[in-house]
Amino acid sequence: PVERLVHAEKKTWLDKELFKQAKKGPSIPYDAGVSQALAERRDWLVKQDLALIQSNGEFALRGKALQQLDLMEVYAAGRKLAKKFGVEFSDKRVTLDQPVQYGGFVKLETGTWAIVSQGKELQLARVDHEPKLERGDMAVLKQTEGKLELETAPARDKSKARTKDKDQEMEL
C-alpha cells in the first residue's frame, strides 16, 4: 500500500513521482490517497534533509537524494541483519580480494547483496548475482569484466565443518 511507502528508508515510487513533479510538473492526476501519501513523503524527505522547500514555495530534492535513499536502504538492511545475528553492522566497503566469511544474501531494491563477515562485523557487498557458495565458506570479492561476484577463497584449513543450507536468501 502507498501509505507504507511514506516513511520507508529507501527509494520508493513516491520519490520517483516527486522527482518527476519537481522537474516538469504532475503527469497524471492522483486520487486522494496517493496525493496524501505524496504530501507526507515530501514532509518526510524535508525532515530527513533530503529535500527542501525553496523560497518560491516549490519542493525540490537535494542533490544525490535518491542515492542517499539507496544507501539508507542498505544500511537499514545491514543493521537489521546484524541484530538478527547478534553482531555489529559495518558500513565499510568490502575490499576486493580480502577474505570474508559468506553468510547468505539478501535482495533489496538496489540489487543483490552478499552478507559477509570479518570477525564480529557484518558487512554487505553488492554483487551482480546470487553467490554459488555455502554459508560459512571463506570467499573473496572479485571484479571480472566489470561484474562483482564472490568466489571461494583459496583454502587454508578444511577441518572446519560447514552446514549445508540450500536457501541462503535472508528475510528481513
Image (cartoon, rainbow, N blue to C red):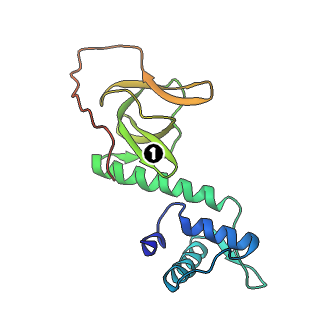
Taking the spot 45% from the left edge, 41% from the top edge, the residue there is: 113
Residue 101: x %, y % from top left = 36, 30
Element type at mark 1:
loop
Q: Report whether 50 appears left or right of 138.
A: right
Q: Residue 136 in the image: state x and y as whole percent.
A: 30, 29
Q: How many marks?
A: 1
In the displayed orientation, state which residue is furthest to the front: 28
Q: Nearer the viewer, residue 50 or 132?
A: 132
In the image shown, does 95 or 163 lie closer to the viewer? 163
Query: Left of 2 or right of it: where is 143?
Result: right
The part of the image, by quadrant, that contains residue 158 is top left
Which image quarter holds the N terminus? bottom left
Q: Nearer the viewer, residue 28 or 68?
A: 28
As drawn, 90 above or below 4: above
Q: Does 49 appear above or below 30?
A: above
Q: Position of residue 95 (x, y in %)?
A: 53, 31
Q: Which residue is rendered at x = 28% and y = 46% of the image?
A: 85
Is residue 115 shown to the viewer in this render? yes
Residues packed near mark 1 inside 10 Å, few (<14), some (14 to 19) or many (20 plus): some
Q: Is residue 80 above or below residue 58?
A: above
Residue topped by disc 1:
90
Q: Amino acid at mark 1?
A: Ser
Q: Residue furthest right?
A: 56
In the picture shown, does residue 62 fall above or below 161? below
Question: Which residue is pictured at 41% across the width and 14% down the height?
Answer: 154
Residue 61 is at least partly visible in this image:
no
Pinpoint residue 98: horizontal percent, then vertical percent. 49, 25
